Amino acid sequence: MVSKIIKIALYLALGFGALTAQGEVDEDFMTTMEDLNKSLSSNISVKDGKAATAEATEMEKMFVEVEAFFVKKTDAADGVKWSQDSRELSAAILKSVVAGDFDTAQQQATSLSKTCKACHKIYKKKD
Amino acid sequence: MNRKAYLAVVLALSATVTVAGAADEKAAADTAAKAEAVLAGKTATASSGKTEVAKANFEKNDAKLPLWSWQQVKSPVAPNVQQKNWVRTPIDAFVLAQIEAKGIKASPDADRASLIRRATLDVWGVIPTPEQVNEFVNDRSPDAYNKLVDRLLASPQYGERQARRWLDLARYADSTGFQNDTTRPNMWRYRDYVINAFNKDTPYDQFIKEQIAGDEINPKDQNSLVATGFLLNYPDNYNSRDLVQRHYQIQTDMTDTIGLAFLGTTVGCARCHNHKNDKITQKDYFSLQAFLANTSVDEKIVPLVKGEQEIQWEKAQAKYQAATKDIRDKQKAILDTVREAGVKYHKERYLTDSREAIFKAKEQWTPLDRWVNHRLENISTERDVSGYLKRAAEDKNFEGHKPELVEKWAEYEKLTAELKKYDNLKPTAGSRYISAATELGNPVAPPTHVRFTGVHERPLDEVQPAFPAALTDEKPVIVPTATSSGRRTALANWIASPKNPLTARVYVNRVWNQYFGGGIVSTISDFGKAGAKPTNPELLDYLADSFVKEGWDVKKLHKQILLSSVYRQSSAHRDDAYKADPDNKLLAVFPRRRLDAEQIRDSLLVASGKIEDKVGGPSVFPPLPANVNVGVNNFDNNPAWTVSKDWHDHNRRSIYVFTRRSVSYPMLEVFDPANPQLVHSKRDVTTTPLQALTLFNSDIVFGWSQALAGRVINEAGNDDSARLDKLYQILFARSPESSEKSALREFLSKQEKEIKNKTVDGKFEISTPTGLKNAQGQDPVHLAAFVDLVHTVANSSEFSYRF
Amino acid sequence: MNDKSRREFLLKSGMGLGGAALSGFIPGFGYLTAASAAELIDPLAPKAPHFPAKVKTVIWLHQNGAPSTLDLYDYKPELVKLAGKPIPESFLKGIKTSTQGGITKLFNSPKRQFKQYGESGAWFSDLLPNLAQHADKMAFIKSSVTVGATHDISILKLNTGDVNPGRPSLGAWINYALGSANKDLPSYVVLYSGDREPSAGSVNWSAGFLPAVYQGVAFRPGASPILHLDRPGGLAASEQKNALALLKNLNLKRAAYYPEDTELQARIRAYELAERMQATAPEAVDLSKESEATREAYGLNDEATKAYGEVLLRARRLTERGVRFIQVVNGGADNEITSWDAHNSLEENHSKMAKLVDKPIAALLADLKERGLLETTLVVWASEFGRTPWGESGDGRDHNPWGYTQWVAGAGIKAGTTFGQTDEIGVQSQGQTVDTYDLHATVLQLLGLNHLKTTFLHDGRSERPTVVYGEVIKDLLA
């Protein structure tokens, strides 16, 4: 219960007041995600569990925002789906990493990257 | 605000919350409030640019913010640094700030010998002499290095080196390219112009204007005319049957080249479609092309000032003309009988719209017709008529065929063969005329149209000369002269304006790249959105700003960089720097770099004592390797490569080697020279066994080693130890270490044994030093071993690198 | 000289110390330490793949300029039907096309004839009569995708996996991962049929952040692909050997001061290789030893095919001699036609370009087969993108990165099959797509390498050929 409240508080902090003034899902946001993705892939490759865990966790959180962004757009059902898929993949990567199964994590990370590309095809201004 | 930092704040705050009932609900709410407060606090002090961006739709951001490189150049203040005593110039402060942010220090100065070797290679493109090294090393005055820099910049070799860099951008070549690869006999004058411009320190803005519009701005000044050679290096195909298309293609080349070379902008991408990254539309692109619309080339301008070269050329030509008058008169007589038909036939091979222009009466010419006809005149030669004669004689089905022509053609061929025998009388180098851009004496330009998908056969709206709308609101001020449209002047003025945000930045970045092996913006000719961002924007703007404020003075820019501590740093390996910055992006260690093709060849020439110091003049033809077959195909009846008769020409600096687009000079080719087919921004560095084969097995290089061996012996005498010292002084500006010396001596004795034992095809054949002043009493085997030693040491990495 | 840093570097760069943690005595220098002895380890020593390889040599036929596979392999009757009409909107869904102001009309060359060939029934157009005879050797990839604004960046992506320079090319990765199978020749060679090196530049065969020794070596076209193979000035072989040994020592000493500088190390290797090449290279590239029949088959007697034919014949010889990766880039067909890039006059362009490559590639496939080499060689037809069904200026095609065809032939692939497809008029891929990363992953797989495990530590990051992407296309594998 308490942890739930903490989570909501966090989500609020992430979701409303903050979002409109700060963490936009803009180009810089996406660049950060891309860097994060590359770093995550590297950390999985060298089997750095601690770093990979932290990064996968962050990725998942960021996709929450992305999903919210697309939901707000109201005409971007595919964008919503991609962000949901991405969020799930991030969670799956986290699980694999925590369990020490880096091979699976790597496959999942590659799938995640592919999802990024698919969404970019439509929603990234220049590719 | 930085996204990562924000998240870190939130995550950190969340970590402080512990679990325990109702108190926690409050705590949780507190956390949320704290987070918001932090955010609010952060918001208030967020860096200016970002808050403007706070709209949820990321598609509009690009439109709101002009590109970083399109914003006006700032005048940054040098930051504070810890290692204050390392800072000699503001450049150092900007660089050091980033180094210190990584928690490391800059490197100490390189030792003097290394420094002069480095600086001489960078500024002159050759190694220094031992005398120059000693003078500098022993100069105890406090401004010794200052004096060195001044001396380096004052020498004509500075201009030669800078010119080579510029010629890379200008896609310089002495021939037209394509399959025929016709010689461009006058282009060498443009090279001279560039060398001279750098040597007399022409301000960069003037340099720009002269090259883009010299003929408009100063039509009576020979120098200004020659400068427009910059525009005229486009690859060309004289065979092209579509002259109207050629006009379009040439304009395209000029526009794209100007965009890349001066503005660091890939305007060419916007020819077929709106630029995919930068805010340049097709309309913008063709509005730029419009500035070039009336540009043509005159390749037969008689020099206003006849120099020695012209006088010699005319002398030789006169001799040739006199000796061949009879033959040529006879040839002309034969061709005259078919001339009218031949010319008409030749004209008819052109495509429809070209033909229209060609057969129109002169009074009815539009500006484009004028261009077309002028080009036709330029590329028409006697071969057009003789080609017709040949066809008419040999092809029975040809409509122009007449039986009597068979005999005439046979006679003509005989005369041609006769004529060839006098080829050795022809002037061997240089040319009579000047080539320059021209607007054919008429200020009215042909219209420019946007082309559908860039295809010239699909014209759309007409456009007027204009600058890219998203880049500037400025409108061109076009003032036609009596003989020229004035458009290129307007374009040049805009590019060379202190308010143009790109020009100075692009140029200072190029110079930075020359010294440090990488630009502050790594994409040297792309300052657009797809290009890299500056790694040190304050440094870039500082350089650009001071460059303009100092009157666009190029030598001052070089001096500033050369005097900086960054430049003077040691290149010695440092574990801490390597760990913190493995790619040495921050320049905490001076970057080692392999020499470029010209530096290697020229330095070998200097070391061997064979270098010819002459500055400027027509291109030369050093010998090619024996098995390189450039073909017996004749370009305009001239072979592709006729080795210069005067052997002095073989030892000129590499910048003077004839640049034939279809024949890359092999010794230079292996070391990543510029590609003259395009605007070449950055020299690659590859490492291949082909380079090794060239340096080790080329007879020419081996010959230089023999000469170097001779020089060393002449200067150092008979003592082996002294010879080794001298050799190292010449090549590396240092003395050999004792372990090196023992290895070298051991090699000598071992090699002597090998030489004594060998025979080549039963003969005893050895290679001894050349140019020996006193060979008496010297053991030839020992001398031969010494040659091998010299050749080996010259092949070492240390020679081919700048440390 | 810091032993620890050097050892660390060598380990991280995958070269390792191996069994050569030995000390060696070099005349004049004394004994080397274990760490500097590591410099003597050959970075090109053959290394075992992750699992047994099907392929020993890759011949990568980069079709420079991007051919229209709609005019070569992809028969689209719907396109024939709709030619001259505007493109139905449905085909453009989900992609951003380049031209503002609308796509031009659909284009089909009236001369184009397609037929099916072989048992597989693969489609070939009239432009590839010779290649069509080898239909059953190929596994087509008909749902290729990439990003395609301009040639330069897409070529870079095709070869190195990124649109920005700095990454190693596929050949460099393979060189790094597997080492050389013939120490007397470069194990990664670039051949081109144009006059000059491909204008896209040496970044396309660069080692990127891998040690410089792994970069490709470009041979010249024409009669003298490698110059200066003969010793100069009467120098005897023994003299030269001595001299080169001295050179190596001098260079090693220098390089030891800069342990992280792989370029200096590569130069040392380059000289060693050069020494050996003197003996082996002349024979390797000498086409005069080939029979008249072979020369004829490769098109050496016809100006229209000679340039490319020479290059492919050379490639076959290099294959026989164990070169691992042969990157072939076509030049032009004549004065005006310098590549496949037919934005207009497609018919003229492609009839000449197809002529240039058709007979030689067919000859290569037949020749490899006959010599039993096809069982260990992979031939790849790749291009930076494809071309659109809509015509530019009425008689050309624009760039198409959304759906185009490439093919592979040779060892380990499912010959006579087709993977993937594009829509009825050849705009977009349908179903599973094959990006450049997937092609790379598949090629690596055939070489016995798991792309996910082919890694190199650079700048604190573990890098692999496929960046963060890549999927082996299992359906292509036998």
Image: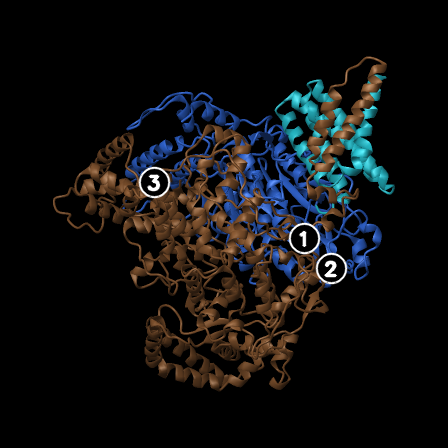
Given residues B284 and B375, the one toward you in this image is: B284
Residues behind callouts 2 and 3 on a single chain: no
Residue C140 image position (x, y, % from top left): 69, 43
Label the cyan chain with its letter: A
Label the blue chain with its letter: C
Mark 3 and mark 1 lie on one chain; the one further toward the N terminus is 3
Q: Secondary structure at mark 3?
A: helix
Chain B's colour is: brown
Given residues C63 and B39, the one toward you in this image is: B39
* Residue most extreme to the left: B777
Neighbours of disc 1 within 10 Å: few (<14), some (14-19), many (20+): many
Q: Secondary structure at mark 2?
A: strand
Quadrant where the image shows the N terminus of chain B: top right
> Total label count?
3
Q: Which residue is mark 3?
A: B112
Q: Secondary structure at mark 1?
A: loop
Q: Would you say B410 lies left or right of B272 here? A: left
Kindly indicate whether the residue at mark 3 contacts the one at mark 2 (C-beta within 8 angstroms).
Answer: no
Residue A85, visible in the rendered structure:
no
Q: Amino acid at mark 1?
A: Asp
